[in-house]
Structures are given as C-alpha cells and as structure tokens.
Image (cartoon, rainbow, N blue to C red):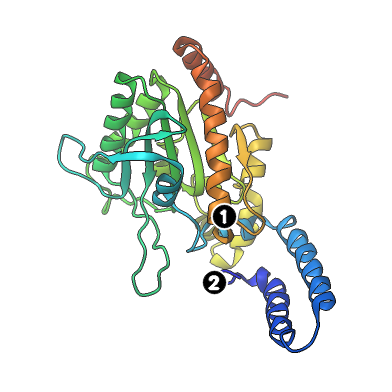
Amino acid sequence: MTKPILDFEQPIVQLEEKIAEMREIGKAIDLRKEIAELERRTDNLRKEIYSNLTRWQRIQIARHPLRPNSVDFIKNIFTDFIELSGDRVSGNDASIIGGIAKISGISVVVLGNRKTKDKKTNLYKPAQIPSAEGFRKATRLMKLAERMAKPVISLIDVPYNASYPENDDPGLANAISNQLAEMSVLQTPTISVVIGEGASATAMALSIADRLLMLENSWFSIVSPEKAAETLWGSLDFKEQAAEAMKPIARDLLNLSLIDDIVPEPVGGAHRNHKMMFEILKKKLIAELKDLRREKIEKLLKKRHEKFFAKGVWRE
C-alpha cells in the first residue's frame, strides 16, 4: 500500500499486511491456496471500496501527496520538452511550468501547475498559487502556440487560495481575466485536464478549452469544501457535507455537462500506479488531439464559444 494511508484504505491495508505475513510463512510451508484466496478477497474489497467512494474521499485522493503532478506527466507522457520562461514584462513565475514538447510525434505547447517534493519526506508540497507573472507567461506561451500552429495542453492542479485585498498580487485579476479572454479565442486546438485539484479562479483561467477533461478522482470548483463549510455552517467540521452539496468531482460535472469527459484512473487512484496513469492519459490525449486536428479552426472556435455560452443556462 502506498503511504501515507487514507482512513478508508485501512481494511485493504490490513489484508495486504496479512498476505505479506503469509508469504513469509509460506517459505516454510505451502500456503499458496490460502494466499490466493486472501488475494481474491483483497481485490474484491479494493474494487468495492473504490467504486463507492464519497465525494470527500475522492477529494482526499486528489490531494494525496504521492499523486503524480504536472511535472511527472510532462516527463512521462511527452518527449523533447523544452521549458520556456518569463512573461516578457516583469519576470518569471516558477509555479507555472510550460514549453514546447511532442506527444506521439505531434508538436504541442504544454502547461501545468508546478509542485515540488520535500527532500526530507519525499512527498509533494502543494502547488504554489500562480502570480500575475505566471498567468502572463501562460498567455504568452499560448499565443506562441497559436503563431506556430501547435495545439495547447494545460494540466491543472492547484489548491484553493482565498484572495484578500491586503495580499492580492498586483495585476493578478487583470492577468487572469486576460488569460480567460485569450483562451476563448485562441486559434489553435486546446485541451485542459484537471489532474488533481482545480480550485478557484487560478484553475478556471486554464480551463477554457475545446476539451475539458478530468481525472476520475480529481475535483474542480471555485471554492474548496473547507471554505464552503466555514462560510455556510461556520465550521470546518461540515466539510464532508459541503463536498456532497457542492458536487465538485468529475462524475458530477460530467452529469452537469460542465466537462467533456472523465479519464479513468488505476484502481485506488493515480498515486498507486503512476506508470498506468501515464499510459491512460497519454492514450486519451493522443485520441483527442487527432480528433481536434481534423477540425478547421473556424469550426473549433464556433464550437468552443457555443459550449461555454451554453453553461449555466436553466430551462424549465
């Protein structure tokens, strides 16, 4: 079992530990039948637990410190990656990683929110919230992709961060709004994937795409369940109820037609099998790219506008 262990994974951990013990004993006596039966029970329990997760449990998986991040996906899905830096205005924000790369021979511009590993624990730290420089860099790279006729792939994984007047980054609101406007009219195919957390305007700014995908155990919302609980119930103790009410996970948003598709994860979450997750997402991205590249840009733009203008419309 991948550590750290989430609460609802404990029954699986206990069985896996029992299997490990029996294998040690099995070096002296034949326990193959008993081990096989216990492995069967473990597989069934694993499937049962992970197919009936609550919304809060899926959010916990999305936040797992060993979940692959944007840098991991870029390194393992794309080739020939050349990182590009700077916003050509005031500086470079390292929390946004982006550059030119190839996927199955297709040249693209790929962007993502950077997380770093703590050297002592080897666990990922939360993504830094992008600054105005970060969004200006993202916009610059997208405009570069447009000029070079390269599709844009954005990997979204950023936690919720409440904005207050006293700590608001100068120019941040303008940079975000400009990013949203540019993505809506970008004359090249675009794909955005929520790979973990997709919170607040910082995540929304990278989501105006021809294809908006979510990994199975990711979540996407303007606020976090904790903030919603604090605002509506006055206590973080109600975060699970808030998650149920918000409906922020992939299945909910697909049912509401707010995203285009769900990318399945290995049983137990992407953190349990990085290699399989990379293969699954790579296959999906290649299929989407091939589909989008068949369309004329004018038709893509028309579909993109119609898709986003239709969101939020209520019919009796």
Give the quadrant of residue 103: top left
Q: Position of residue 96 (x, y in %)?
A: 32, 45
Name the side, left or right, on which 261 lies relative to 122. right
Numbered mark located on residue 270 in the image? 1
Q: Amino acid at mark 2?
A: Lys
Name the side, left or right, on which 218 lies relative to 165. right
- Label 1 to label 2, Cα distance in Å? 13 Å
Q: Amino acid at mark 1?
A: Ala
Q: Position of residue 62 (x, y in %)?
A: 54, 56
Against 152, residue 202 (above or below) is below
Q: Which residue is mark 2?
A: 3
Q: Position of residue 291 (x, y in %)?
A: 56, 22
Where does the C terminus fall, quadrant-wise? top right
In front of the other: 29 or 51 = 29
Q: Residue at x 52, y 34 (%)?
A: 285
Q: Residue at x 71, y 71 (%)?
A: 12
Name the side, left or right, on which 262 lies relative to 190. right
Give the quadrant of residue 44: bottom right
Q: Residue at x 15, y 35 (%)?
A: 89
Against 111, residue 122 (above or below) is below
Numbered mark located on residue 312 in the image? none
Q: Can residue 215 be seen from the camera position used here? A: yes
Where does the N terminus fall, quadrant-wise? bottom right
Local crowd size for mark 1, using a 10 Å CA cut-off: few (<14), some (14–19), many (≥20): many
Q: Position of residue 166 (x, y in %)?
A: 26, 53
In terms of secondary structure, where does tag 2 sit? loop
